[in-house]
Image (cartoon, rainbow, N blue to C red):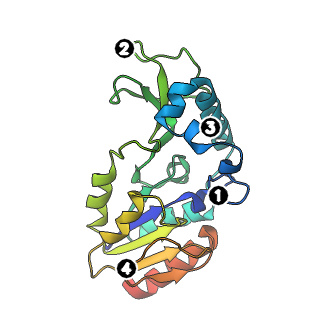
Amino acid sequence: MKKLVVFTGAGISAESGIRTFRDMGGLWEEYDVMEVASYEGWENNMELVLKFYNERRKQLLESKPNQGHIGLVELEKYFDVEIITQNVDNLHEKAGSARVLHLHGELMKVRSTVDPSLVYELKDWELKLGDKCEKGSQLRPHIVWFGEAVPEMMNAVRITQTADIFVVVGSSLNVYPAASLLDYPPKFAPVFVVDPNEITGNIYRKVEFIKEKASVGISMLARILKEKYL
């Protein structure tokens, strides 16, 4: 069974109603990203940051996986699928994907501000000022903010290096270091990009583009992969 590594971005979740930062009408038009997605913003106004992520969780709890997420689960019947995602939602898991690595954290988890190893599952959407870890410090969203290290990056590189086939879905390939994963599939591995938009990131290898949204493009991708590699 061939190893299929799939790297997903905001575009796959947008079809489930998850608002992105970058798209027209996106969150950047409502919020200064540095106020809600940086440690400096957290120190300056914890209540605003908590409110922002509480809103995101409420939205997530009302959202369902779309045909893009479900199509990736279907591919597990034919390929050894591993997903690396920039997304902090849990829609891949809700759809039933067996192996998902979250590069930028997880919205339904929170962690200690003094000990990053203390991570907790949230059962509901709300994290409040005064909610503390077992060491007595305020809990914060379990999210990699701008300016912070990406702890899972080396694991993502390791997974990508094992790919027989590498697929990018719904990413502009503009956010680093995540976008640099395109440099790591083996030279023999074919690369596919599923996205309706022009990719503005730098691409230095041969890529087959499927210019469709994820729900349509992954179905098209599945047909191509079955014809070529089964």
**Helix, strand or loop status at disc 4:** loop
Q: Amino acid at mark 1?
A: Ala
The residue at the point 31 percent across, 65 percent down is 160
Between residue 10 and residue 27, name the one nearer to us.
27
Circle 3 residue = 57
Of callouts 2 and 1, which one flags the residue occurring earlier in the amino acid sequence? 1
Marks 3 and 1, how far apart in space?
Answer: 15 Å
The location of residue 98, given as percent across then percent down, is 41, 54
Of callouts 4 and 3, which one flags the residue occurring earlier in the amino acid sequence? 3
The residue at the point 43 percent across, 71 percent down is 167
Nearer the camera: disc 4 or disc 3: 4
Circle 2 residue = 135
Marks 1 and 4, how far apart in space?
Answer: 27 Å
Between residue 124 and residue 175, name the one nearer to us.
175
Of callouts 3 and 2, which one flags the residue occurring earlier in the amino acid sequence? 3
The image quadrant that residue 188 belongs to is bottom left
**Helix, strand or loop status at disc 2:** loop
Nearer the camera: disc 4 or disc 2: 4
How many C-alpha atoms fall within 10 Å of the one at disc 2: few (<14), some, or many (≥20)? Answer: few
Q: Quadrant of the N terminus?
A: bottom left
Circle 1 residue = 14
Marks 2 and 1, how far apart in space?
Answer: 37 Å
Of callouts 1 and 4, which one flags the residue occurring earlier in the amino acid sequence? 1
